Image: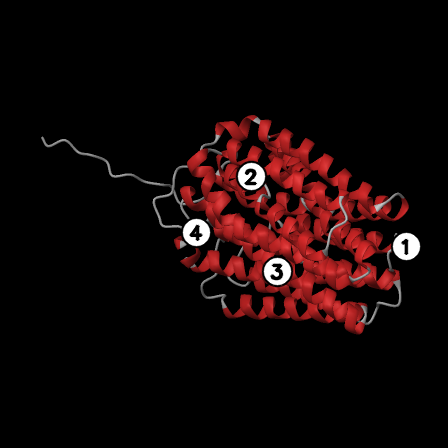
Amino acid sequence: MSTYSSLLKTPGVARIIAAQLTARFPFGMLSLAFLLHIERVHHSYTAAGLVLGAMSIGQAIAGPMTSRLMGVLGMRLVLWVSLVLCATGVAAIGLFVMPVELTMAIAFVAGVCTPPIQPAVRTIYPKMVNSRQLTPLFSLDASAQEIIWIAGPVVITFVSTQIGTVEGILMAVAIMLLGGAWFIASPEVGRVRIPRSKRRFGVVLTRPPVLLATVVGFLLIGACAAVEAGVVANFGQGSPLGGVVLAIWSMGSLVGGLLFGHIPIGPWATARRMLIVFAGIALSVFTLWSWWGLSLTLLISGFGIAPALAVLFAIVSASVKFSDTAEAYGWVGTGQLIGAALGSALAGFLIDGFGAVGAFYAAGAFALVGFVVAALAHGVHPDLRGRDASPIPDTEPVPVQPS
């Protein structure tokens, strides 16, 4: 733990982690908030899954583009504009009762305007710490973000079930605006300038580690989205147990990230972590009847989530030039968001057709394929044992005067 304590003593690190976690906290609430709100309004988990899918697809399309725009227009301008537009769209979904198709359209626009906070902060990190501290910082960040998934489900489930789903959505909007303003105003955001990339848009995705991180992230988050929907459906809207189980699941991820964050990253690191995720989800199919049994099996699954994400962040950072890091993380985010969209939508259909267990079958399939992909791709997985995860420096031709 001394590694993490020394990291937090580095100037600015604790502040930027806290600011970006607050700014992203609402996105740990919105999936459940929309699921509960749309199901209450339209009496259909399928409709709720379609709205969540529309927002996630919008986020997926925008991710690489808004991330790349930060190198052209500057981080603060892109973040401010997207923050205001996204908050407006989310508030409209909560305040107005609309047909499912119109709600999906607004959710899509809100998704397109999601502030690219995650790519921004992952681009800032290498400029805040030395190369030896970077991999532990990615692990600390991946673990700390589980606070979003520990507190978020509990808070939004309580507010939405005990007060109202509209109030839950508006609370998420208020936190989004306050947290986003704090992050954007942070000195580090103004201090770090992302160089304009000289490569064509999308070329960074051809690098095998970036593609691997994008595909595995898609499958991992698809599994998580399906589990989230399945847990809510399993316990019903009126019970707070769903939020408690999801919080315990995220606690497992937090603990796993802190325990395994210092382990050197080898070629099989991602595959091992995905196997843990799959094993826990597979066991969960047999424990749906008991909240404590489901909590235990999901706790096991959670031990692999933050460690897997930390590895994905590290192999991307170590494989691209600094000017390409924001776009690369944008693509990884896009993969995760497409996974969230498909995982939520597929889980919604299966819940309506087969009950909550259908969502866990979908989640298990996502996680199993994620393990297989990571195992088959171990040959292109960067071996960071004895190496740092800093981005490749951007270099320019140096003119030489003739003697």
Asked whether disc 1 touches disc 4, contact meaning CB atoms under 8 Å apart, the reply is no
Q: What residue lies at 82% left-to-right and 60% top-to-bottom?
A: 43
Of circles 1 and 4, which is in front?
1
Q: Residue at x 42, y 53 (%)?
A: 202
Q: CA distance from mark 4 to mark 2?
A: 17 Å
Query: Left or right: 311 with respect to 103?
Result: left
The Cα–Cα distance between marks 3 and 1, rounded to whole angstroms, is 28 Å
Residue 309 at x, y = what percent? Answer: 60, 53
Which residue was labeled with disc 2?
121
Which amino acid is tagged 1? Gly
The kind of secondary structure element at disc 1 is loop
SS class, disc 2: helix
Q: CA distance from mark 4 to mark 3?
A: 23 Å
Q: Which residue is mark 3?
A: 339
Q: Earlier in the sequence, mark 1 or mark 2?
A: 2
Sort mark 1 into few (<14), some (14-19) or many (20+) by Cα contacts within 10 Å.
Answer: some
Q: Identify residue type, mark 4.
A: Ser
Q: Earlier in the sequence, mark 4 or mark 2?
A: 2
Cβ atoms under marks 4 and 2 closer than 8 Å: no
Q: Which residue is mark 1?
A: 238
Q: Which residue is mark 4?
A: 319
Question: Which is more N-terminal, label 4 or label 1?
Answer: 1
Q: Measure the C-alpha gap from mark 1 to mark 2.
A: 37 Å
Q: How many residues crowd around disc 2 within 10 Å: few (fewer than 14), some, or many (20 or more)?
A: some
